[in-house]
């Protein structure tokens, strides 16, 4: 199945994985399905449920989608974006899903790019 991986260093990568728990854990290190309000209802985010305890870097895109600024709990580690079906759980993305989500994530990276903000503050 096709998923969209968003890394902690803002790389946005379409991937083919089997969809098994093992393949998900291999990509992101753990498993929890999150339905953030920042994503359209037909999608969900798969995250490492122990990312903070493993001291993984914060995922800015995942944290923005998860509305971390409202509740203070960030997403740590890489994330996978997948399509969510109420009765079937999650499934792979179509090419149009990948394009939509990739554009959405790229926009978030351009708006919330912490590295660029830090660099500009240092130059002032």
Image (tube, helix red, strand yellow):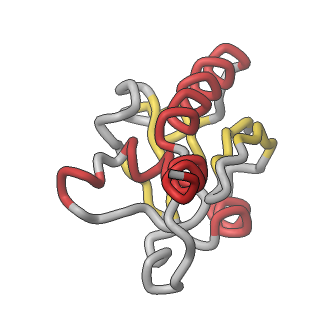
| Residue drawn at (18%, 58%) of the image | 71
Q: Is residue 5 left or right of residue 62?
A: right
Compared to residue 94, the image places residue 80 above or below, namely below
| Residue drawn at (47%, 50%) of the image | 62
Expressed as whole percent of the image width and height from the top left, the position of residue 11 reads 72, 46
**One can see residue 27 in this view:** yes
Expressed as whole percent of the image width and height from the top left, the position of residue 19 reads 68, 50
| Residue drawn at (63%, 72%) of the image | 29
Q: Is residue 17 left or right of residue 115?
A: right
User: What is the quadrant of residue 75 in the picture?
Assistant: bottom left
Which quadrant: the N terminus? top right
Which residue extends farthest front? Answer: 124
User: What is the quadrant of residue 16 in the picture?
Assistant: top right
Which residue extends farthest top? Answer: 96
Between 110 and 57, which is closer to the camera in this rendering?
Answer: 110
Between 22 and 44, which is closer to the camera in this rendering?
Answer: 44
Compared to residue 43, the image places residue 61 above or below, namely below
Between 54 and 30, which is closer to the camera in this rendering?
Answer: 54
Expressed as whole percent of the image width and height from the top left, the position of residue 44 reads 45, 40
| Residue drawn at (56%, 76%) of the image | 56
The number of numbered discs placed on residues in the rendered structure image is: 0
Which residue extends farthest right? Answer: 16
Expressed as whole percent of the image width and height from the top left, the position of residue 47 reads 50, 60
**One can see residue 46 in this view:** no
Compared to residue 8, the image places residue 14 above or below, namely above
């Amino acid at each position: 199945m096709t998923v969209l991986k968003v890394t902690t260093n803002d790389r946005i990568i379409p991937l083919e994985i089997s969809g098994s728990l093992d393949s998900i854990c291999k990509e992101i290190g753990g498993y929890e399905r999150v339905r953030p309000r920042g994503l359209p209802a037909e999608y969900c985010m798969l995250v490492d449920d122990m990312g903070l305890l493993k001291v993984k870097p914060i995922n800015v895109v995942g944290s923005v989608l998860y509305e971390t600024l409202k509740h203070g709990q960030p997403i740590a580690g890489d994330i996978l974006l997948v399509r969510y079906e109420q009765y079937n759980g999650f499934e792979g993305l179509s090419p149009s899903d990948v394009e939509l989500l990739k554009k959405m994530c790229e926009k978030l990276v351009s708006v919330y790019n912490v590295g660029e903000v830090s660099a500009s503050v240092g130059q002032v």
